[in-house]
Amino acid sequence: MSKLPFGKRNYQLMIAGLVVLALGFVIMSIDKEPYGFGFLGLTLGPIVAMAGFIIEIVAIVYSPKEEKK
């Protein structure tokens, strides 16, 4: 049996990062200003999307000392 490259916590963080990332893009898309130049399109959406990317990086780098089975 082959061992998975990441632990359960890594996969949970990856899913959370994907959800936050998708939420950031949805926030950017619902901006009603022309060409998305409002607060949602220029400020809040990119910050949330960047947080999603940071969560993904943490999920990849995270290495638990010992996972319980």
Image (cartoon, rainbow, N blue to C red):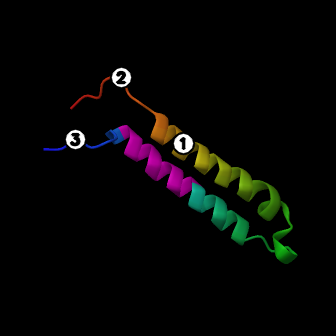
Q: Which mark is residue 3?
A: 3
Q: Which residues are magenta?
A: 9-20
Q: Distance between the Cα atoms at labels 2 and 3? A: 16 Å
Query: Contact, CB < 8 Å: mark 1 with mark 3?
Result: no
- Three-letter residue code for mark 3: Lys
Q: Which residue is mark 2?
A: 65
Crowding around mark 1 (Cα neighbors within 10 Å: few <14, some 14 to 19, many 20+) is some
Q: Which residue is mark 1?
A: 57
Task: Give the residue drawn at x 64%, y 46%.
Answer: 51
Residue 11 is left or right of residue 42, and the answer is left
On screen, residue 25 above or below 49: below
Which of these two is toward me, 27 or 67?
67
Q: Distance between the Cα atoms at labels 1 and 2? A: 18 Å
- Three-letter residue code for mark 2: Lys
| Nearest to N terminus: mark 1 or mark 3 | 3
Looking at the rendered structure, the secondary structure element under dot 1 is helix
Looking at the rendered structure, the secondary structure element under dot 2 is loop
Task: Give the residue drawn at x 52%, y 46%.
Answer: 56
Quadrant of the rendered image containing residue 2: top left
| Nearest to N terminus: mark 2 or mark 3 | 3
| Nearest to N terminus: mark 1 or mark 2 | 1
On screen, residue 19 above or below 33: above
Q: Residue furthest left?
A: 1
Q: Which mark is residue 38?
A: none
Task: Give the residue drawn at x 48%, y 35%.
Answer: 61
